Amino acid sequence: MNGIKRKVFYSFHFDNDVFRVQQVRNMGVIEGNEPTTPNNWEQIRRTAGGVERWINDNMQGKTCAIVLIGMETAQRPWVQYEIKKAWKDGKGLFGINVHNLKCPKMGICRKGPNPFDGTKFTKANGQIYVPKTYDPSASDAYGDINRNLSTWIERAIADAM
């Protein structure tokens, strides 16, 4: 990757996983979209078309979308929107199970279902693609993600082509 930090978009379930997501963001391996505060998010949600516009604006200029998968991530409608938009826009796309990252409020949680299941991803050449999901080690989830994140991003970008 030549020391260049890729710009990525994080997709996740805010209420359940924001503290786990912050751990990934704070690794400093990549440039991710900045989190919005709960108050700003409420204002975005109340504005007509606000969430979709926020997603579209924040996904611009990113090379990859990373779905940080917690217990309920797969069921979130906006996560599904982000997945489909990232694929349609030709961005790298993959998931990381974050259930073993400790949250100060909730500890660890159960592994959630794969948010890519049920969506068909077809490349321009007609080949079916299945975005990879990574399941970091239960004993060192943080270290596993930190050591591999750049490689996973580059692999996803290459796979999307």
Image (cartoon, helix red, strand yellow):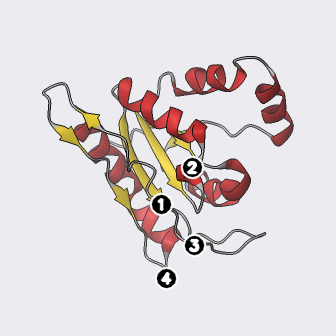
Q: Please tell me whether mark 4 or mark 2 is closer to you in this view.
A: 2
Q: What numbered label is drawn on residue 75?
A: 2
Instruction: Assess whether mark 1 and mark 2 are in contact (beta carbons under 8 angstroms).
Output: yes
Disc 4 marks which residue? 139
- Answer left or right for 68 relative to 88: right
The tag earlier along the polypeptide, 4 or 3, is 3
- Answer left or right for 103 relative to 61: right
Assess disc 1: are there few (<14), some (14-19) or many (≥20) residues with their C-alpha within 10 Å of its C-alpha. some
Q: What numbered label is drawn on residue 110?
A: 3
Going 55% across and 43% down the picture, which residue do you hit? 11
Going 43% across and 76% down the picture, which residue do you hit? 137
Kindly identify the amino acid type of the residue bearing the numbered disc 3.
Answer: Arg
Tell me the CA gap for discs 1 and 3.
10 Å
Q: Position of residue 89 (x, y in %)?
A: 38, 23
Kindly identify the amino acid type of the residue bearing the numbered disc 4.
Answer: Ser
Kindly identify the amino acid type of the residue bearing the numbered disc 1.
Answer: Pro
